[in-house]
Image (tube, helix red, strand yellow):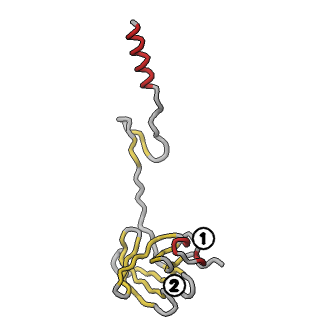
């Protein structure tokens, strides 16, 4: 009898653990597992004017086919041009002066440009070259 009581006590203890986490990001299935929700967001629209520092500016316009852009940019005091951009996930890739470049969504701190720090809606090519939609802070 003692063995049966001990077995019942152990079985109850094993079943009294914490309940599975069903909060937040999933739905409980009939099998008791959690089905995670996946978020699919529409591609971000990068078209429009993006401002950098010291005359740097980037204008992005749709170019014919979906996922293709015309990038008109002044990337330093002496260089400007227009380039064909192609969407690649959340980035836009382009070739400038025979060098593959990528525009990535970032914040102003990632540009490493003092006057863009604190901005939240920016595109960065590389440290020292970035553009933000919400202009310059002073």
Cα–Cα gap, marks 1 and 2? 18 Å
Looking at the rendered image, the quarter that the C terminus falls into is: bottom right
- Residue 137 percent across, percent down from the top left: 63, 77
Q: Which residue is mark 2?
A: 57
From the viewer's perspective, is residue 105 above or below residue 25?
below
Are discs 1 and 2 less than 8 Å apart at CB? no
- Residue 49 percent across, percent down from the top left: 51, 81
Q: Residue at x 41, y 50 (%)?
A: 37
Q: Secondary structure at mark 2?
A: strand
Q: Secondary structure at mark 1?
A: loop
Q: Which residue is mark 1?
A: 118
Q: Residue at x 41, y 8 (%)?
A: 2
Whichever of labels 1 and 2 marks the residue nearer the N terminus, that label is 2
Residue sitting nearer the eye, 42 or 112: 112
From the viewer's perspective, is residue 85 above or below residue 8?
below
Q: Residue at x 43, y 76 (%)?
A: 103
Q: Residue at x 55, y 71 (%)?
A: 109
In the figure, is residue 70 to the left or right of 52? Answer: left
Looking at the rendered image, the quarter that the N terminus falls into is: top left
């Amino acid at each position: 009898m003692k063995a049966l009581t001990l077995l019942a006590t152990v079985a109850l203890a094993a079943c009294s653990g914490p309940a599975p986490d069903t909060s937040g990001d999933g739905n409980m299935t009939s099998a008791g597992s959690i089905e995670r929700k996946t978020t699919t967001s529409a591609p971000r629209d990068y078209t429009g004017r993006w401002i950098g520092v010291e005359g740097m500016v980037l204008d992005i316009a749709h170019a014919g086919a979906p996922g293709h852009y015309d990038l008109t940019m002044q990337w330093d005091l002496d260089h400007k041009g227009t380039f064909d951009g192609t969407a690649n996930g959340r980035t836009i890739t382009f070739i400038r002066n025979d060098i593959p470049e990528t525009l990535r969504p970032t914040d102003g701190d990632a540009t490493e440009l003092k006057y863009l720090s604190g901005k939240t809606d920016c595109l960065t090519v590389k440290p020292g070259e970035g553009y933000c939609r919400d202009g310059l802070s002073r």
